[in-house]
Image: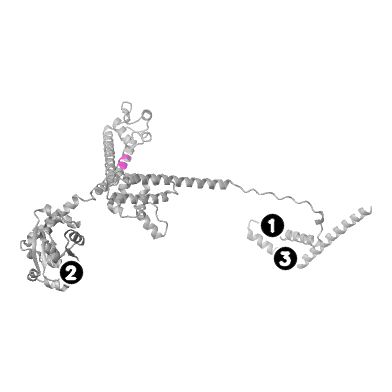
Amino acid sequence: MLILVENAAGFALFRYIGSDTDFPQTIAANFGSTEKAKRAAKLQLFHKFAGMDEAVEACSAIAESRISSSLDDFLKEALTESIKKSEKLAVAEPKLGNAISERYGIQVLVDDRTLNLYRGIREHLPDLLGTLAVKELSDMKLGLSHSTSRHNIQFSPDKVDTMVIHAVALIDDLDKELNSYTMRCKEWYGYHFPEMKDIVTDSLQFAKVVKAMSTRASVRTADFSDILDEETITRLRDAADTSMGSDITMEDALNIEYACEQIIALTNYRTELQQYLSARMAAIAPNVTPLVGDLVGARLISHAGSLMSLAKYPSSTVQILGAEKALFRALKTKRETPKYGIIYHASLVGQASAKNKGKVARTLASKLALSIRVDAIAEEKDETGELGKASRAYLEKRVGQLEARLTNTKTKDKTKKKEVKSTKPKDAGSYNISGDVVNVQASSSRVIEKDEMQVESPIKSSSEETSTKKRKQLGEAETKSSKKARLTKSIKSNLLDKIRRQAERLLRMAE
């Protein structure tokens, strides 16, 4: 069995005297000492690297499971037709072994036993090679490590991502600095000309105007034509004539001018940095930029660490990326989780109404996840950003549909509130004379109830508890005899009234 060993010095081919079915204990015993290792593994062929460039190329190819040109020449020389038919080749990397087997037609072994063989050979490699000292091989390993690391950094695909991450972080820092400088400058110059901050609201224009006129005394002679329009210039000069500010010295004015120069310089640098970031984002993420813009896309990449890391996130994670604190707080308190994170600042989410922001953010996140993966791992680079533009058009149409649906719902609700159900009045019935019958018992009971109510109803008081107590006291004071007396009296009066009415009717009939 042949063993292919790659190291910092070059490629080596050993022949193992044992069998490929040896147990790990047997292999460990065969490489127990230097003498045993020399008997167990015989060097067949060795190719030393001509220089560090060849070593770096071979190392990078093996890491990518490719066959480098130097390894190809070495295997063509070592693997003759007779060896291919009769021998097996042990390889450390499975993917590299598959490539060798397909190209050279030799049976390749990659298993636990071969790993034990490699462990034993590397332990005694300087002695097995014979031509290299231990220190020389160690120096080669160190040099190859440095060269490989330098090569990986120089040709790293994340290098452009790093530029974007630092650029967007610097833009955020510049925004904070500009805000602080501008507020300080306006407050400082406000002692001299307090009306100016209400007339010139733009920070850059404010700094340029202060630098141009220094003090308000020279407002009539200063040239503001490149900074302000005619109407604003007129208002500024009129306000300077009637300003309530205090006078300042030339030294104060010079220091304020220096602060304004810093504001102007930082603003110009921020503009250049924004243009640089736009160019970088258009190069590395042409499909992400049309969806969310340069700044939001760069912040997403910065938060994830790289474009490749961002491509591994599902759309649900992209949607709430940047709102981790709110998410964990909501999960801890068992409340509603946030609907959006960094993508809240995208224009598509911003133009949606409050009720539709969650739906738009979810749809945007799904389209954004697809665009990120296309930009990160697509075989053919889409520099025109057709997918991003198509997704943008779809999302704009979707936002329009959601807004129209919400408007229609509001209109229907208002119409329902205005509608009032009409009720048809009932027909008034005619008077029935036969129903006019005097009920002695009912009338007497009504009289009794009326009298009881008159007796029981107490004088209204301010407190309900007092009135309730008085009713109870009056009710208990009444005796059964008084109730019977009132009942008898009312019945008699009703009977007398009835008899009197009947008698009068009979007299009228007799006449």
| Image quadrant where residue 494 sits | bottom right
Above or below, 479 relative to 505: below
Q: Earlier in the sequence, mark 2 or mark 1?
A: 2
> Which residue position is annotated with label 2?
113
| Relative horizontal placement of residue 289, taking residue 10 as reference (left or right) | right
Residues shaded magenta = 178-182
| Predominant SS of the magenta segment | helix
| Residue 167 on image: x %, y % | 26, 45
Name the image quarter holding residue 126.
bottom left
Please name the residue that numbered disc 1 is placed on.
459
Q: Earlier in the sequence, mark 3 or mark 1?
A: 1
Name which residue lies at 39% across and 51% down. Answer: 362
Contact? badges 2 and 1 (CB < 8 Å): no
Whether residues under marks 3 and 2 lie with C-beta atoms below 8 angstroms apart, the answer is no
Q: Nearer the viewer, residue 135 or 193?
A: 135
Query: Which mark is drawn over residue 477?
Result: 3
Residue 350: in sight, yes or no? no
Task: Compute the Cα span from label 3 to label 1.
Answer: 16 Å
**Residue in front for this viewpoint, 154 or 81:** 81
Question: How dense is the environment of label 3, judged by Cα within 10 Å: few (below 14), some, or many (20 and up)?
Answer: few
Three-letter amino acid code of the residue under disc 2? Arg
Label 2 residue SS: helix
Q: Residues within 10 Å of mark 1 (few under 14, many from 20)?
A: few
Name the residue located 67 percent from the left edge and 56 percent from the top edge: 460
Front residue of 358/335: it is 358
Q: Secondary structure at mark 3?
A: helix
Cα distance between the residues tagged 3 and 2: 114 Å
Residue 297 against residue 85 in the figure, above or below: above
C-alpha span from label 2 to label 1:
110 Å
